[in-house]
Image (spheres, helix red, strand yellow):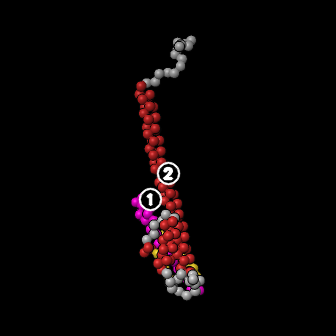
Amino acid sequence: MKDEGGRINGPHPQPLSQSWARRMRRLRDRGAALVETAMILFLVLLLVAGMVDLGRAFSEYIVIGEASRAGARYGSMNPSDAAGIRAAALQMAANNGVAVAEGDIAIAGLGGQPGNPIRVTVIHRFPTLMGSIIGFETITMTCATEMVIVGAVP
């Protein structure tokens, strides 16, 4: 379509080199956006995995706290029964899905008299999901509970 002066109306054809350069620039921009998205996605996934690890660790810390309380509660009534104290702590941990070794339960004040304290300490090694990334494979958690011995249950 020509106007009054004989010129062509509409888009003017561009030289091949300018068109090609513009197309390459767009492709390069798309590639850069893809790389940026991949980097951001990696960081977001790393952050989410860290939050999951932290949540699991906090949950297991609560469980070993409950286990130490269960052992101390049993020990406050039966201060001479070391096996029973350990069994109470192990049972509480197992009921909540946390594996604690029997050797990871320490008892202080065993065989004490009424009015004296008994202390039960539970140690748990929490395996992290991201151990190699954050620099350590396990987190050692310790919970201790101290209660007053009230006497033996008849």
Which one is in front in this view, the residue at disc 1 or the one at disc 2? 1
The magenta segment is 115-138
The amino acid type of the residue labelled 1 equals: Leu
Q: Is residue 40 visible?
A: yes
For residue 136, which quarter of the picture? bottom left
Secondary structure under the numbered disc 1 in the rendered image: loop
Relative to 15, say whether 116 is above or below: below
Identify residue type, mark 2: Val
Q: Is residue 48 above or below residue 30?
A: below
Q: Is residue 140 visible?
A: no
**Other residues around mark 1 within 10 Å, as few (<14) / some (14–19) / many (≥20):** some
Q: At numbered mark 2, what does the secondary structure look like: helix, strand or loop?
A: helix
Look at mark 1 in the image and give the residue it sits on: 129
Residue pictured at 54% horizontal, 73% vertical: 70
* The C terminus sits in image quarter: bottom right
Residue occupying image coordinates x 51% and y 57%:
51
What residue is shown at x 43% (from left), y 39% (from top)? 31
Q: Tell me: residue 86, above or below residue 127.
A: below
Magenta residue check for 17: no
Q: Nearer the viewer, residue 87 or 102?
A: 87
